[in-house]
Image (tube, rainbow, N blue to C red):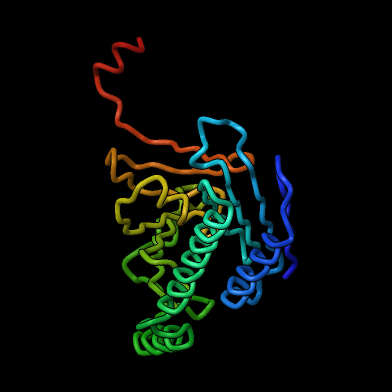
Amino acid sequence: MDIAIVGRHTKVSEDTREKIFEKMEKVESLAPRATRAEINVVHERNPRLSGERERVEITLHDHGVIRAEAAADDRLVALDQATARIVEQLRRQHERRANRHKGKPSLHAVVAQEMAAAEKAGTTTEHGAPQDSDSQDGDRVESVETWEGAPEGSTVEVPIDGTPIVIRSKTHSATPMTVSEAIDQMELVGHDFYLFLDSDSGLASAVYRRRGWTYGVIRIEEKTDDAERESA
């Protein structure tokens, strides 16, 4: 894993560099396929931020991007905190992968089961998949059940009458979380945005990545009659 250390508004001493390499050895043991780690050591010159004058930002490239940062009045303390946050994200990532296939049938087992049921019923499509005798080709709705590696929740494909367009709808269960937790989840899966239920406002929301280390959040609120009159 390549390690790049950059100092902003400061010089990174050899002692600090050695500490960073030690910390990255632990990170690399948890992410052996990571290709690069970027560590930015930032000194805040604003005297009003003396308690957070030393900030460490860590970006890990491992099947996506995992980021963490921490600020403190001591540079090594900030390094410890940022490293701990990266390690925690990697731990949760490992747990998600371990639980992904737990208790779910394999793809081979699902296909074999469907084929056996289709042969027994004597109704299959030209591709060998079971055909719903109660639906017509024009308004057929196909429900895809859970299989190995599938996301949680159901997936339904609904064709639009008279067109080749098919709308794929996915339903996921969600636990309310804060904006910070949603950002952590977004970085964990390596996406540019993440949908969630805001535990503070109770609204359906989305966080997204902007330039640099900044993020944005969009919340959806039902438009009331009063709001409509005000906007008129």
Which x, y percent locates residue 197?
33, 47
Q: Nearer the viewer, residue 50 or 28?
A: 50
Which x, y percent locates residue 189?
52, 60
Is the N terminus in the top left, top right, bottom left or bottom right quadrant? bottom right
In the rendered view, would you say 43 is above or below 17?
Answer: above
Which x, y percent locates residue 74?
54, 50
Q: Nearer the viewer, residue 1 or 100?
A: 1
Q: Is residue 106 left or right of residue 1?
A: left
Please tell me which residue is depicted at 44% across the width and 62% down the height of the picture: 137
In the rendered view, would you say 72 is above or below 48?
Answer: below
Q: Which image quarter: residue 231?
A: top left
Numbered marks: total:
0
Please tell me which residue is depicted at 42% across the width and 48% down the height of the picture: 180
Q: Nearer the viewer, residue 114 or 75?
A: 75
Q: Which image quarter: residue 198?
A: top left
In the rendered view, would you say 207 is above or below 66?
Answer: above
